[in-house]
Image: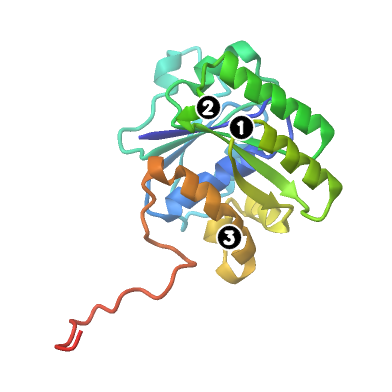
Amino acid sequence: MNRIVVLNPKGGSGKTTIATNLASYFASRQQKPVLMDFDPQGSSLRWVRKRPPELPPIHFINAFEKDPRTTRTFQLRVPDFSTHVIVDTPAAVEANELPELTRDANKIIVPVLPSDIDIHACSRCIRDLLLVAKIRRDDNRIGVVANRIRRNTLTYQSLIRFLQTLGIPIVATLRDSQNYLRAAELGTGVHEMKTYIVRQDLEEWRPLIEWLEPVVHRPEVACGGCSDPPDPRPAGPGA
């Protein structure tokens, strides 16, 4: 089982968008993802409830509500069949909470928006992950996603220069796309939408998936954007 934590104490950075799209990606690849939501806003919960029944199921764990009738360990238990756990963390996480949130995480994704406020928040988040949560740079467990990007802007250039100074890889640059809003409204993800509509978005997700690949062992099945399937007919003598 692989645990992927999407984390940034700054609200509005796109954590839920990335978490839900990761969950839908793995589900569409015939995996068994679990979406664990620690955010009291419950955005991931609303997304799961909107999910059409004909799409592959995603197991959901409501981690932001504590049930006094049971233990916390029991409430957060992950089914044995699970292949991936995607953790959607809340805003305003304190530094001393990071070790618990990131424990056993194979990868930690830090989304950041192109603004001075978000750049400052990202810098502090990375610092706390390194110094408080004791995540080592050379473990390649932390990756930054530049989110809602418009490439031909000064704020984008400023963001990229800043991220390059952190010594942390920029694992994806995602554009400001209406497709994410549509996916959120429908309870789906961009990897489950018609390829011709989301082709550019899928290309932007490719580096992130490849960064996760050594951990998640991405299976090449059910790929809407892949080339033609192999010919099932037996090869002839000249093959």
Amino acid marked by disc 2: Arg
Q: Secondary structure at mark 2?
A: helix
- Front label number (1 vs 3): 1
Residue located beneath label 1 in the image: 167
Circles 2 and 1, Cβ within 8 Å, touching? The answer is yes
Residue located beneath label 3 in the image: 203
Height in image: 42 above or below 18? above
Q: Of callouts 1 and 3, which one flags the residue occurring earlier in the amino acid sequence?
A: 1
Amino acid marked by disc 1: Gly
Q: Quadrant of the N terminus?
A: top left
Amino acid marked by disc 3: Glu
**In the image as oriented, which residue stretches furthest toward the right?**
154
- Image coords of residue 59 (percent x, y): 44, 39
**Residue 23 in the figure: left or right of residue 11:** left
The residue located at (68%, 40%) in the rendering is: 14
Residue 137, numbered circle: 2
Q: Of callouts 2 and 1, which one flags the residue occurring earlier in the amino acid sequence?
A: 2
